Image (tube, grey):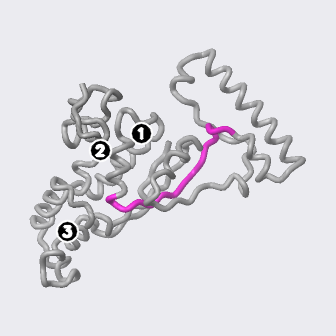
Amino acid sequence: MIVKLLTHTPDPERTVAAAARLCYSPIGAADLFQGLTDDQVAKLLKHLVESGHESPTEHVTFTFAIEGVSRALSHQLVRHRIASYSQKSQRYVREKNFDFIVPPSISQLPTAKKRFLETMAIIQQAYDELLEEVPAEDARYVLPNACETKLVATFNCRSLFNFFRLRCCTRAQWEIRELACQMRDKVRQVAPLLFALAGPSCETEGVCHEGRFSCGRAPVVSYRGQGKDVE
């Protein structure tokens, strides 16, 4: 898996701080942006992050290049709808000798890995043969979820908070969890204050809301908004 932060809003932390301060100031946003000291920015962001006042964070965006991931992952990723995606097309890009992702649980078992690789070879042969008879957009129907894909994804900061809250959790599927953790590492390099408390509730609040599905890293306090403690 390769994850690169292609671009982001310039000076994202100052932008968010200026947007937040504007709500309580007669001064215009441009003047606020220039006038805030580094200490003021840090203090404002600390307050925003700890209080959960996230709307000002929507003013900054982060764009990622993602490669070496499966179609199984991309189907999960696009469920995060407050984001923009561009993905390699299987309609226009022919999957001759397609790469594929092997789950660790399969690669660690010789018999399972052998069956998996044999199946990928059979699919490749079937796909290649179908290309001789039907359009690529129809031949692709035999391609597996394991098929490698590439994407460009753009999120605003608030949407990333939600993404990291759900997908950095140990209950998330292994591949998208790895993606989320890598993305979090990248944004923390350019906006450490903004993303200081980005992640699952066990890390950010010291509690878990997964109920009976909890991994046990933190005390369980409620079950998905039902308003009652779960043992």
Amino acid tagged 1 = Arg
Q: Which residue is mark 1?
A: 177
Left or right of 154 in this view: 98: right
Considering depth in this image, is 43 or 97 the residue closer to the camera?
Answer: 43
- Residue highlighted by disc 2: 199
- The residue sitting at 46% across, 41% down in the picture is 176
> In the image, 102: left or right of 177?
right
Residue 14: image location, x then y, percent:
22, 69
Task: Report the residue at 19% width, 68% height from top.
Answer: 17
Please report whichever mark, 2 or 3, sits nearer to the chain's N-terminal start: 3
Residue 215: where, in percent of width, then height? 32, 27
SS state under label 2: loop
Q: Amino acid at mark 3?
A: Ala
Q: Position of residue 97 (x, y in %)?
A: 73, 41
Query: Which residues are the magenta region?
Result: 144-158
Residue in the image at 45% along x and 56% along y: 64
Q: Is residue 16 left or right of residue 64?
A: left
Where, by quadrant of the figure, is residue 110 drawn?
Answer: top right
**55 vs 25: above or below:** above
Q: Is residue 41 left or right of residue 163?
A: left
Distance in Å between CA atoms under marks 2 and 1: 11 Å
**Disc 1 element:** helix
